[in-house]
Image (cartoon, grey):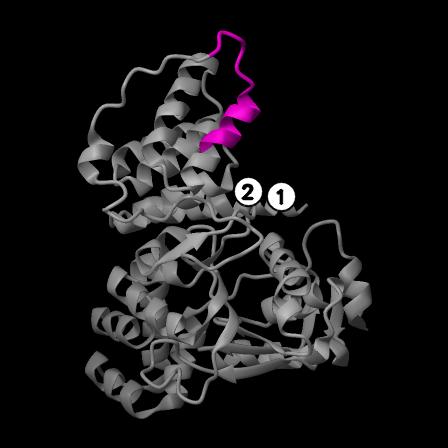
Amino acid sequence: MNVAAVETWLQSYAGLESASIGADAVARAARERIQATGCPTVEAYLARLEESSEERNALIDRVVVPETWFFRDRPALDALAKQVVEGWSRTRRGATFRVLSVPCSTGEEPYSLAMAFALAGWPLEQLHIDAVDISRQNLERATRGVYGRNSFRGDDLGYREAFLERAGPDTWRVSNRLRAPVRFAYGNLLADDFAVGRRTYDAIFCRNLLIYFDRSTQARAVRMLDSLLAPRGWFAVGPAEPVLLLAHGYELLKIRSGFVLRRAGSSDSVPPLAIRPPAPAVVSWREIARPAPPVRAPDPAPVDPEVALAEIQRLADAGRLREARTQGEALLAQRGASAPLLFLLGVVAEVSGDTARAEELYRKTVYLEPDHTEALAHLAARAELNGDLRAARSYRERAQRALGKESR
């Protein structure tokens, strides 16, 4: 039975590409649902999908397999909470901080957000989290709020004793205190009415979803979320997704393994990483492409690599890409390769439009430091943009494993 038409429907309705999820898994799910519904043909099943919301939910639940845990990618959660407590609240005393978590999966992320804010000293009555997912099955589990051991990873589990209660020998239930700020709801990010009735959010968490969309669907989803984000709001994505937001006017904040962005020009106590393309009037492609002039060391004294790297970062942050590249190449020639230097040069090359050079430098970075999450994330995003979904998936998996090691 050829179920390609069901795969096409799934991409159109939910944006999910079978190549990203796994073509065999999608085809198997489609055949199981066709058999379960007793539809004699694929065409009959497509008609059932159009007329039955229950069947749409059943297929989605069969395809979307949740893989998440509490405090996954914790740096983003902690950094956001710290920024809100130490900066945002100064000009908004008594205001409620609003967050959108989409997809919220089985609830670990929105509950982790609430815990991170509580641990940072933010009153939970001034926190509102809209947790949205396309899977009814995921939402039922999230609303139930009971979790087994697989939802708790790493060695630091003190939060579990503080915010959850024993529900059985190997299960824990979310406390009422933690439930209070979270509102679970069904929603399809790609639906035309997704934004209807929603106020803007101060932060949006949309992690590890865009990587499953094709480029046009990614752009559509980002535009929808961008319309819901407050002018100086935060946008958190998965490790392979920051590059996807560059064309939409976002810049990445320097939060190690955090993958949090803001719109270009938003003031922030956490400085941006220089990955935003400068205006053509400032740096032209012809100027970038021109061979850099020979570099003469101003002082024969040995170069301090950390000081030199900090200066290159400063130049890059200021948009002075040609100078950053020149000094970076000089440091490379004088002191040899290091993962931080290669990665920074890769970012500068990518912003300058030299994506081939950027990919080469990212690969050299992970050769020296196999668990360099940012380089792996950029390689995954470049591979996805080039249409190499197999390579993108491999890099994403490596980045996730590296993050897992950092969280232990």
> Residue 101: x, y in percent?
52, 71
Residue picked out by circle 1: 406
Does the magenta-highlighted stretch encompass residue 334?
no
Relative side of 40 to 236, left or right: left
The magenta span reads 299-312
Three-letter code, disc 2:
Ala
| Residue 301 sits above or below residue 352 on the image | above
Q: Which mark is residue 402?
A: 2
Q: Residues within 10 Å of mark 1 (few under 14, many from 20)?
A: some
Q: Assign the N terminus to one quadrant of the image.
A: bottom left
At 46% from the left edge and 85% from the top edge, which residue is drawn?
A: 198
- In the rendering, at what x and y percent does residue 281 appear? 23, 46
Foreground pick, 174 / 285: 285
Q: Secondary structure at mark 1?
A: helix
Q: Is residue 215 left or right of residue 180?
A: left
Say left or right for 31 vs 131: left
- Image quarter of the C terminus: top right
Q: Pinpoint residue 189: horizontal percent, then vertical percent.
A: 39, 76
Which residue appears farthest toward the top when viewing the image? 300
State if disc 1 and disc 2 touch (CB < 8 Å). Answer: yes
- Cα–Cα span, label 2 and label 1: 6 Å
Q: How many marks?
A: 2
Q: Residue at x 67, y 76 (%)?
A: 145
Residue 2 in view, yes or no:
no
List the single residue furthest toward the bottom: 51
